[in-house]
Every structure is written in structure tokens, then in C-alpha cells.
Image (cartoon, grey):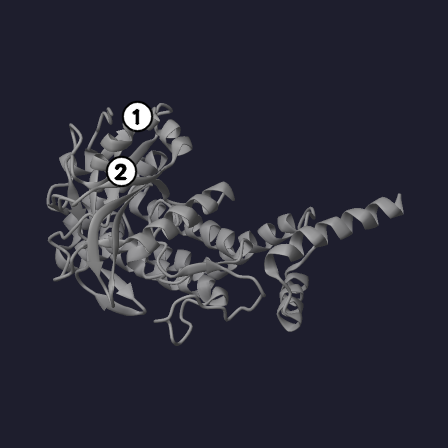
Amino acid sequence: MDFTFDNSFHDNMEGFYAPADPAKPLAPKLLAINHTLAARLGFYVSESDEAELARIFSGEQLPDGANPLAFAYAGHQFGHFSPQLGDGRALLLGEIIAPDGARFDIQLKGSGPTAFSRNGDGKATIGPVLREFLVSEAMAAMGVPTTRSLAAVETGDRVQRERTYPGAVLTRIASSHIRVGTFQFFAAHFGVEHVTQLSDYTIGRHFSDLAHAANPHLALLDRVIGLQCDLVAHWLGVGFVHGVMNTDNVAISGETIDYGPCAFMDRFSVNTVFSSIDANGRYAYGRQPQILHWNMARFAEALLPAIHRVSPADVDAAKDLVDAIPRRFRAIWHARVRAKLGLGGEDIVDGEFIDSLFDELEHHGVDFTSFFPRARDAAARRRGNAL
């Protein structure tokens, strides 16, 4: 299987990662392969390749051109800053260029310990691997920006948690694995030179149109805020609750990342939580827009050294961007609700109506998913009867 790697992060960002090698699995066995995604990436996969695929996607066999590495990053976890996290159970095999020219990371998740494992085993169990495979691909099918799942492999190992479970490795595909926490790590430990380098790389990789902005780092903040507003509006629109909206789980690309504790709502409630450790409901369904705001404020703080270096006056402009997030998000969210209801322009459904609609959904315990198609059907019948 020819990956034809083009590893820009490894080659150009030395000092931003730690080299890593996967642990050798006992008896790898392919559980699932995403043929549609493989074709999108330019791979042809046949059933006769299963043994080779199991070796590659378990970490037993490194493909030619791979430069495995673990990303360094920090993060606010449930509001508390952890200055060093990093890929403790994942490693980047490398980057490939798809037939349409798009660049993607290929990452093994659950492939063993790295320099950032903090005494952990770096392994994953079969349940969470299959959950991420299914949920990430469901999100992609619904049009929600997300990391993708290419393969799931059972390793043949037993992984010790509260009891032993079968081990497994997920192959995750992403536009990149650069996170808000990546910027936080280098802002906290190394300062303006590293933040500027990381920002320049991010702009070149994801947002090349920003390179000639008056202040590219300020423009990066603006772009990422927009992507995150759109992403969280998507989440709310499909009833998705992300259980760990920590800053290390916020991808700069605007893709959903980390399908640990998460789920889709049935009966509507703004206080729905799907994480046993989120005792105070920090990441409840209805608080996700507030956490988006909080996370983007942390991103702005990490970017400020680079923004200030170009223009000290732009620090105030960065603050203004952060302050505007609630209004910006609300406009995007209202547009998404209008689309879900099958309605037209802003004059048809205003914010007050939308707020009262969701109050009624909660009051009556309405099923979130089934309500919207039924509402559209009822509106269509009413329009038909009026003709």
C-alpha cells in the first residue's frame, strides 16, 4: 500500500513534537476499513490486503516514508490549565496529499506509549475505538466538520483498565492535529518566536489566503473563531454533545476531534451531559456556545505575542473579535435553525421565536431528532392547503 507521504510538520517544525514508535501488537486483526474514505485519500483497498492493512494500521509495520511523531500540546481541562499534555496514546504516521490536492494527517490512536504518556500505557480498548469510528463517520455523513476514521484494528493484546479489555487501534484522518492547546503549549513554554512559527505554519497549511493580511496572526484568530462558531452550531443542530470541550480538543481546522464521552440527544434538554466526570455540567448541550467563547479567548491569549509583534494596536482588535463571539455565534445558530425548519430569510423567524421554540421543546420533553422533519412536513402541508 503506497502512502506517498509528504511530511511537512516533521520536516519543518522540529522542536514542536517528539519522535515516537508504535508498540508491536500481539496479533493484529482488521476489524473495519472505510473504503469510501480510502478512495477519497487516493487508496485502493481490496479484501486480499487485510493482513497487510492490519499490520500497518496497528503499528506493527511502518509504511515507507512514515516519520512517526507525537504532538506536544497543553490545554485547559475542565477550566484548569495543564501545561504539558501531548499525544500520550497517539502518533502521527505522516501526511499525504489526496488526488484533489488536499493534505491529510494519518494518525494511529491507541498504538502505545510516547514521551507524553505520563506513565500511561498509550493503548486503547476496542469499545472506544469502534465508538469513534461510528460516531465520526455519522458526523461526516451529516455534513458536520470532523476528523474521520479510516481503519480499526484489534491488536490481540489485553488492556488493563478497571478490568482487562481487548486492545485496538484507530486510524484517524484529519486536516491536521494542530489544536488550541498546541498554541498554548508553545506560548507558555517558549514565547513569541515559537508562537509565530506555529501560526505561520498553520496559515500556510490551512489558510494560505491569510498570508498577505495586514496582520496574518490576527486574521488567523478571526478565521478560527468563525470556524468554531460554525462547528458548534452544527453540533447543536444535530443534538450532539461533546463531553470534553477542553482546549486540547479544539482543532484549528474547525473539525470535531476527540469522540470520548459524547452522544446525540433524544429528549431535548439544554442540561444534557454525556460525561460521567462532568459533574457540574460544564460541557452540557446548552453551555457549548459559552465554552466555545471561553476556548477562543484562550486561543487569543496564546496568539497575542505574535499579534503584538506585528502591531501592538491589534491587541485591542483581538479583544474585540473575542467580545463579538456571542453575537457572531447567535447569527450562525439562528440561520441553522431556520434551515432545519425549512424556512427562508431572517425576517421569517427571529431570535425571540427560536428561543421560545426551544423552551417549548424542553418543557414538553420533545424528541429532538424527530421534531424538525415533522415540523417541516406540517409547514409544507399547511402551505399546500393554502394554495
Picture quadrant where residue 122 is located: bottom left
Picture quadrant where residue 253 is located: top left
Question: What mark, if any, has residue 48 been given in the picture?
Answer: 1
Q: Contact, CB < 8 Å: mark 1 with mark 2?
A: no
The image shows residue 280 at horizontal and vertical percentages of 40, 76
Q: In the displayed structure, would residue 1 be above or below residue 143? A: above
Q: What residue type is labelled 2?
A: Ile
**Residue identified by numbered label 2:** 106
Element type where label 2 sits in the image: strand
Farthest residue, direction bottom: 280
Residue 321 visible? The answer is: yes
* Quadrant, the C terminus: top right
Estimate how packed mark 2 is, as few (under 14), some (14 to 19) or many (20 or more) residues with alpha carbons within 10 Å. Answer: many
Tag 2 or tag 1, which sits nearer the N-term? 1
The image shows residue 346 at horizontal and vertical percentages of 66, 51
What residue is drawn where x is 33% and y is 48%?
A: 252
142 sits to left or right of 369: left
The image shows residue 332 at horizontal and vertical percentages of 54, 52
Q: In the displayed structure, would residue 361 be above or below residue 68? A: below
